[in-house]
Amino acid sequence: MKGVADPADIFHFPRTEEARRYLGLLEKGDAQALTLFGPRRIGKTRFLLRDLAPLAEARRIRTVYASFWQDQDAPQEVLAVEIRRRLEAKTPTAIKKVLSALDAEASVTTPSAPGAPSLSIRAKSAPRSPPRRLLQLDALFEEICGQRGKALFLFDEVQQLAASRQHGPFIAQLRTSLDKRQGRALAIFTGSSESGLAAMFSQREAPMFRFGNRIELAELGADFIAHQHAALARRGVQVSALSLSRAFATLGGRPYDFEILRNKLIVRAKPDVDAALGETLEERAELLGFSHMWNALSPLHRAALHELASGDRKLFSAAALKRIGRACGQPALSAQSMQGAARALIRRGIIHQFEKRGPYSFVDEAFASWILESD
């Protein structure tokens, strides 16, 4: 994957020092892999694609980006396509070549982030045996790394791999392919679910147990606001830096959401940060469907989610059952009823449970924030 940094984007806030620090840990052999946690829309993907990838490519390190959110049923095909895309990658012919070998087909859609590939892959016939496909993937690892070169793999939203046991062989092969090429195959794993990452890297029986060193993307602060304030001024938008800072805090420090607010300021005849913030909050909730999701839930489901959003992940404790029951009008709420509600919320794709008897977490933490803000 070629670097996608765009010097014409005056709003991009470069995280150059962070990119150098993390890449340095990998290049010097201080870490074989890094795991980067951060909620969705916090800027992880943009950091990978706009800061880290261009730096690696400038140092002659081939970079492969793969998001396991985009196709959760066929992660090995997603990764194979992205490796081949980087190897040959100028026309769709390269993608067709690897898909032909996998007996699959794909449609390419508009990227959800600058430079991010977005694919939908499905098998055309009965899939080849998993061992054969995984061996083909290992051969691609060797090809992209080369005998003396290096490759950096940027694996985004890897908690999706932990959501299903069927991905176990792929995860094990991924670990093996990286281990075999230690020093040549560098990796950064990102995730928006803390419990999902724990399921991937902290469970003793997991293939990735203790594989990556944990890091966290630094929160954006005054420097980011100063950069955005100056860039807006260049576009003729005159607002106070303090009002931008307050709005950014209200948006949970999420650059993606701030971008929506910023664009509203640019198109308004008379820029008003408070008005733009209100519109942004409403648009974010509507875009993500929070109101519709909430209205479709039963009182029990709502009470359970409110309890979870409040920070108590032990929904079956006596105190939690009492609070949830009182909130939904069921003073004698049983553990069995709560279990049924939890299973229903998992089926709806609202919460995760990555390990048996493990904690529950929101698939999208922004929904948790919306629930608390809506009180």
Image (tube, helix red, strand yellow):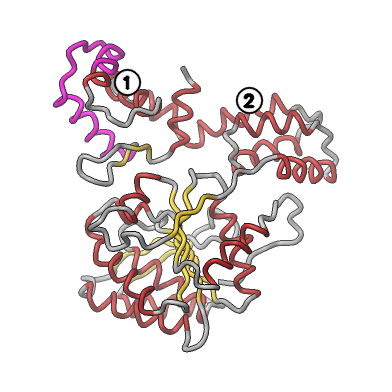
Question: Circle 1 — which element?
Answer: helix
For this rendering, which residue is in front, 60 or 295? 60
What is the x, y in percent for residue 108?
47, 63
Q: Secondary structure at mark 2?
A: helix
CB atoms of marks 1 and 2 within 8 Å: no
Prevailing secondary structure of the magenta residues: helix
Query: Residue at label 1?
Result: 303
Q: Residue at x 59, y 33 (%)?
A: 251
Please identify, in this view, whether the residue under mark 1 or under mark 2 is nearer the observer. Answer: 1
Does the segment drawn in magenta span residue 244?
Answer: no
Q: Residue 190: horizontal and vertical position, in percent? A: 46, 55
Residue 79: image quadrant is bottom left
Answer above or below: position of 243 versus 103: above
Q: Where in the figure is residue 1, as x and y percent of width and height?
A: 55, 71
In this rendering, would 79 be left or right of 103? right
**What stretch of residues is rendered in magenta?**
322-349
Q: Amino acid at mark 1?
A: Ala
Of 93 and 158, the residue lying toward us: 158
Q: Residue at x 51, y 31 (%)?
A: 285
Vertical relation: 300 (above or below) 50:
above
| Residue 214 horizontal side relative to residue 353, left or right | right
Q: Which mark is residue 278?
A: 2
> In the image, is 89 to the left or to the right of 73?
right
Amino acid at the residue labelled 2: Gly
Q: CA distance from mark 1 to mark 2?
A: 26 Å
236 with respect to 102 (left or right)? right
Q: Is 342 one of the magenta-colored residues? A: yes
